[in-house]
């Protein structure tokens, strides 16, 4: 996502979202993003975006697409951290304020979809790295003083062969 993501990965578990990166965490985010897409499309087809059904659909898109973003922004505000998430929320709010409700819905869809994809990729990466570490050799063959011996990998020091 942005520079905030790298910092959040260390402090908050998964990618700044406050999770642990488990496999299923991305699914609810993806569902909310898909719902946001449906309501965003409905807002575009419902009229000029200034009122009526278009505004109702855009509002539903804000709720579904902005749910995770609002939670991250609230957490950031409480911790006095103003990163990418806060800026995206501010831009979406600004778009609504100037009367571009449908564009705000598109922005929230794109941001929520990228968050779900990031969470999916992070969980998958964690799973693959864990599998690699689990299958890593536990013993190493050391060459010392013209002879060989086996020793635990965790006792190796730099410069040993």
Image: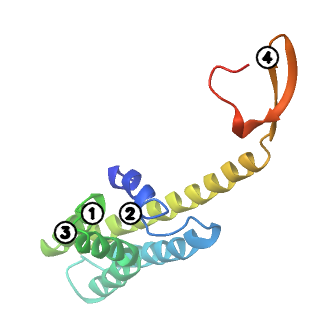
Instruction: Give the residue displayed 23% in from the left and 72% down from the top.
Output: 77
Looking at the image, residue 47 lies above or below residue 87: below
Q: CA distance from mark 3 to mark 1?
A: 11 Å
Instruction: Give the residue displayed 62% in from the left and 71% down from the top.
Output: 24
> Regarding mark 2 in the picture, which secondary structure is present there?
helix
Disc 3 crowd rating (10 Å Cα; few below 14, some 14-19, many 20+) is some
Instruction: Give the residue displayed 45% in from the left and 63% down from the top.
Output: 115
Label placed on residue 88? 1
Look at mark 4 in the image and give the residue it sits on.
144
Look at mark 2 in the image and give the residue it sits on.
111
Label placed on residue 95? 3
Foreground pick, 107 / 50: 107
Disc 4 crowd rating (10 Å Cα; few below 14, some 14-19, many 20+) is few
Q: CA distance from mark 4 to mark 3?
A: 68 Å
Q: Which of the two labelled residues, at mark 3 and mark 2, occupies the earlier sequence position?
A: 3
Q: Which of the two labelled residues, at mark 3 and mark 1, occupies the earlier sequence position?
A: 1
Q: CA distance from mark 4 to mark 1?
A: 58 Å
Instruction: Give the residue displayed 31% in from the left and 73% down from the top.
Output: 75
Q: Which of the two labelled residues, at mark 2 and mark 4, occupies the earlier sequence position?
A: 2
Residue 149 x %, y %: 87, 25
Q: Nearer the viewer, mark 4 or mark 3?
A: 4
The reply, left or right, for residue 112 in relation to residue 55 is right
Q: Which of the two labelled residues, at mark 4 and mark 3, occupies the earlier sequence position?
A: 3
Residue 6 x %, y %: 40, 51
The reply, left or right, for residue 66 in relation to residue 28 is left
- Are the residues tagged 2 and 4 within 8 Å (C-beta)? no
Foreground pick, 23 / 42: 23
Q: Nearer the viewer, mark 4 or mark 1?
A: 4
Which image quadrant: the N terminus? bottom left
Disc 1 crowd rating (10 Å Cα; few below 14, some 14-19, many 20+) is some
Q: Which of the two labelled residues, at mark 4 and mark 1, occupies the earlier sequence position?
A: 1
């Amino acid at each position: 996502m942005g520079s905030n993501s790298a910092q959040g990965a260390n402090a908050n578990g998964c990618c700044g979202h406050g999770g642990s990166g488990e496999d299923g965490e991305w699914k609810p985010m993806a569902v909310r993003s898909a719902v946001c897409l449906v309501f965003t499309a409905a807002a575009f087809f419902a009229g000029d975006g200034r009122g009526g059904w278009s505004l109702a659909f855009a509002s539903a898109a804000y709720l579904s697409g902005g749910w995770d973003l609002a939670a991250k922004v609230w957490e950031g505000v409480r911790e006095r951290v103003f990163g990418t998430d806060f800026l995206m929320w501010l831009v979406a709010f600004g778009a609504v304020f100037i009367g571009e409700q449908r564009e705000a819905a598109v922005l929230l869809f794109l941001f929520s979809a990228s968050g779900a994809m990031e969470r999916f990729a992070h969980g998958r990466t964690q799973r693959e790295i864990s599998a690699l570490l689990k299958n890593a050799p536990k013993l190493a063959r050391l060459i010392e003083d013209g002879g060989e011996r086996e020793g635990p990998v965790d006792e190796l020091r730099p410069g040993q062969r």
